[in-house]
Each structure stands twice: as C-alpha cells, then as structure tokens.
Amino acid sequence: MVKKLSEDELKDLAKEVIGDELYPLVILLQGRKNVSEVKLAEKLKISVNNIRTLLYRLNSFNLVHSKRKKDKKKGWYIYYWTFDSVEARNLLYNSKKKRLDYLKKKIKNEAGSEFFICPNKDGVRLGFESAMEQGFKCHECGSLLERDDNAKLLKKIEKEIKDLEIELKEEEDRKKRDEELAIKREESKIKRARAKSRAKRASKKKGSSKKQTRKSIRKKTSTKRKAKSKPRTKKPPSKKATKRAIKKRKTSSKKSKIVSKRKSSQKLRAKRKIVKRPSLLKKIIKRKK
C-alpha cells in the first residue's frame, strides 16, 4: 500500500508543480477511487465543464486516470477519476531534487562573488562586474549602489539545502523499503504458487498410486478366481476303490458277454424257424425281388 501524502506535501506539490488552483481538487481525490466528476463539481460548487478542465490539467501531469461509463437514465457518459499518489510522490521528489541542485549552484555563486543593491529598495541587485559597468549607480533611480551583506541569505539557503537533503533521503529510504516489501510479496506469491503446484503433483501421484493399488488388488482377486476355477488335482485312488472298480469292470464285461450270447441265440432261433416254414421263405424272397 502506498502512503498518502500529507497536507504539507500536497501544498508543496501544488506550489512547485501543479499550481494552487488544483490543491482543493487533489485533497478531494486523494485516497479515493473512481470518484464521479459530477460529485466533484457539486462539492467544489463549479460546473462539470470547469471541473473537467481542472482534471485534464492534473491528467497532463499523469496524476489522475479515468474510467468512462454511460448513464442509463440520462444517456451521456460520466467520467470516474482516481488520484495516483505514486506519481504524485515521484513528481514531488523530482521537483525537490531540482530545487536542491539550483540552491547548491546559488550558494556557490553567492559565496564566491560580491553583490550590490539599491538603497531605495527598487529590487535592483547586481554583481560586481555589472555594477562596475554601470558606475555603481542604479539604472532606475540613479542613486549609488551599496554592497549587499548576503550572510543571512547564505544561512537561509544552507538551512533549506539541509532540509531538502533530509526529505530526499527519507523519500529514498521509503522507496527502498517499498521495493523490498514488493520483492518479498512477489517471493511469497511465487512460493505459494510453487507449493500449490507441488500439492497438485502430490495429489496426482497419490491418485495414480491409488489406481495402481486398485489394479494390483484386481489382479490378485482375478488370480484367486482363476485358481479357484481350475480343476483340482485328483488324489490317487485307494486300494479298496481300485478293487471295486476292477469288480465293476469284470461284472460289466460278463453282462455284455451274456447279452451278446442271448442276442446271437435269438438270431439262430429265428433262422431255424424260417427254414422250417417254407411259406415264410417265399414271402421274404418275393419282398427282396
């Protein structure tokens, strides 16, 4: 979060950069987002066109940015404005730096040369060379110029230089702190993102391991089922069972021999009957023909 500018800083900004006319508008905009230009005009008691001109002046310094929305009832577009405090701090810092450079040059010039002023306080102040060219006389009133004692001015400039150096150092330290915080936040975001990606990978691995375990369980169950479905190896029969089986075979073979003998005897009997009865033989022969 960017710190708000104090009232003194806003006054300095208005005085040195943007102008005193924009100071009340900056106070209304600071620390707020998407402020309607209609509300700003109502609070400052000026027309919307005038408030827009002031906002465009602020926009020329890149201190505000806007969003446009259409009013559903009236049908025209309304602009919503936001103050950029970061850009305001940068502008103030740059203006202070320029002021510091100017004062350093001025103190060198004041300390290394003599100046002469008009006793009538006409605002005429000349260096030694320019005063000598004019014969040490004021070009406005013609009175003799007096030597200016600039010790007070030098003290004043030195004090202002010290104050500006302190303010600029504080601003630089604040910028460093903000940068370090921003870097830490980015690092923490990267760490969180990495942790999330690791967690996702771990969950995927767990899911794959679960699937593998399920597959292995299925394989085990299928092997068990197959093992169950396979025919069991028969145990070798006992001596009693073998004896019974041999007896059954013998009896069955005997029965089959007896049956075959009976059938053959029946056939022979039938043939003998046919031979005894010639009438039947004739019928059979006729049928065959």
Image: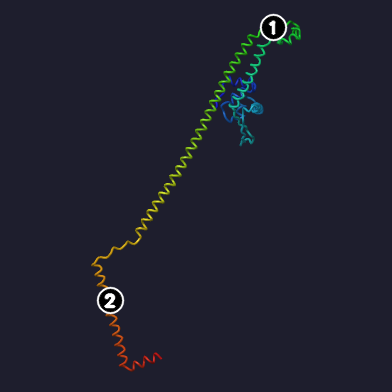
Mark 1 residue type: Arg
How many C-alpha atoms fall within 10 Å of the one at disc 1: few (<14), some, or many (≥20)?
A: some
Q: Secondary structure at mark 1?
A: strand
The residue mark sitting in front, 2 or 1, is: 2
Percent position (x, y) of residue 125? 70, 10
**Foreground residue among 82 and 3:** 3
**Foreground residue among 241 and 176:** 241
Reading the chain from its start, which is encountered first: label 2 or label 1?
1
Q: Secondary structure at mark 2?
A: helix
* Quadrant into which the C terminus falls: bottom left
Relative to 19, 185 lies left or right: left
Percent position (x, y) of residue 27? 59, 23
Q: Residue at x 25, y 65 (%)?
A: 238
- Give the answer, above or below, for where 58 lies relative to 150: below
| Numbered disc total | 2
Location of residue 282 (image quadrant): bottom left
Residue 147: mark in rendering: 1
Mark 2 residue type: Ser
Residue 253: mark in rendering: 2
Q: Residue at x 63, y 11 (%)?
A: 154
